[in-house]
Image (tube, rainbow, N blue to C red):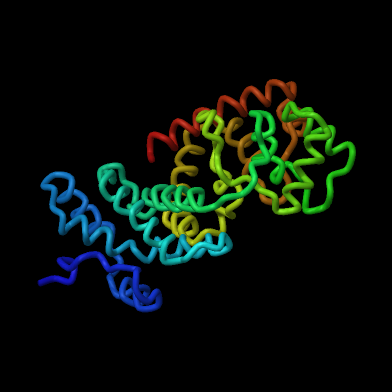
Amino acid sequence: MSSYALPIPSVAGSLESYIQTINSFPILTQAREVELARRFRRENDLEAARELVLSHLRVVVAIARGYMGYGLPQADLIQEGNIGLMKAVKRFDPERGVRLVSFAVHWIRAEMHEFILRNWRMVKIATTKAQRKLFFNLRSLKQGLNTLGAEEVKAIARQLGVKPEEVVEMETRLGGQDIALEPLSDDDDDAYAPIAYLAAEDAEPGRLLEHQQTARLRGEGLEKALDTLDARSRRIIEARWLNEKASATLHDLAAEFGVSAERIRQIEVKALAKMKGVIAAAA
């Protein structure tokens, strides 16, 4: 009997033993992955689904390591992530041309986030919609780690529609680790999970795996999209968005082509929209 006929390994025992076990399962080729996914979707072949799950358990462990700072047992995080992985396998469509790992990352992280939120009990500090918006955006709006200056406080307050005093208070609370991680239950539309903002997404192993697998496809798609543009539009896009040294300004390009800066902006917007459609169609 194939090893895939055995139950999915349990993480309840030794974590080291569990990791050693899951690392022994082979990584699937894309062809094998598509074959198994088709068998599961068309024939409800549970052995095919199990093989898909087993081959991606290491991804769950990698993502779980990105949440070690929340004081929760790694084994519990992994178990929740495995649930997300199984949900992803159930919903995975191999005909879309996307690898399972890219599709599964969202489901794995979502289950881990829910688990963290259920187990954290901290003081809620954002009570209104504007305050919650401030809470979720203040970190990204700050320029560096230094304390906000008076002008920065005013600018952020205007941008987010809150009082300057609220910006100062929120910055102080965030700096003091008095952080609300649970979404408010009285407003589902604005009850965003803070974990999505506090985690360094680009540094998560699961996200890195996803980026590695999609980087080549994105590069090819970008080149195809550029090829659909006329010479002037392509020059504008390359100068504005693809110049590694220094991006050209609208006025620079306006002088180059002998038109107004507004005309350059219009061409840029139209070209970007066209490229977006080409890339989306190829995805």
Which quadrant does the N terminus fall into?
A: bottom left
Q: Residue at x 58, y 45 (%)?
A: 194
Q: Residue at x 45, y 30 (%)?
A: 277
In the picture, measured across the screen, residue 240 lies left or right of residue 153, that is left
How many marks the image carries: the answer is 0
Residue 102 in the image: above or below residue 24: above
Which quadrant does the C terminus fall into?
A: top left
Q: Residue at x 79, y 47 (%)?
A: 172
* Res 83 quadrant in image: bottom left
Provide residue 270's location: percent of width, then percent of height.
Answer: 56, 25
Foreground residue among 267 and 193: 193
Looking at this rendering, what residue extends furthest in the right direction?
A: 150
Residue 243 in the image: above or below residue 127: below
Provide residue 240's location: percent of width, then percent of height.
Answer: 67, 38
In the picture, measured across the screen, residue 84 lies left or right of residue 234, that is left
In the picture, measured across the screen, residue 19 lies left or right of residue 40, that is right
Q: Residue at x 17, y 68 (%)?
A: 6
Residue 205 seen anywhere in this rendered image of the structure: yes
Residue 215 seen anywhere in this rendered image of the structure: no
Provide residue 78's location: percent of width, then percent of height.
Answer: 40, 62
Provide residue 254's location: percent of width, then percent of height.
Answer: 74, 28
Foreground residue among 204 and 150: 150
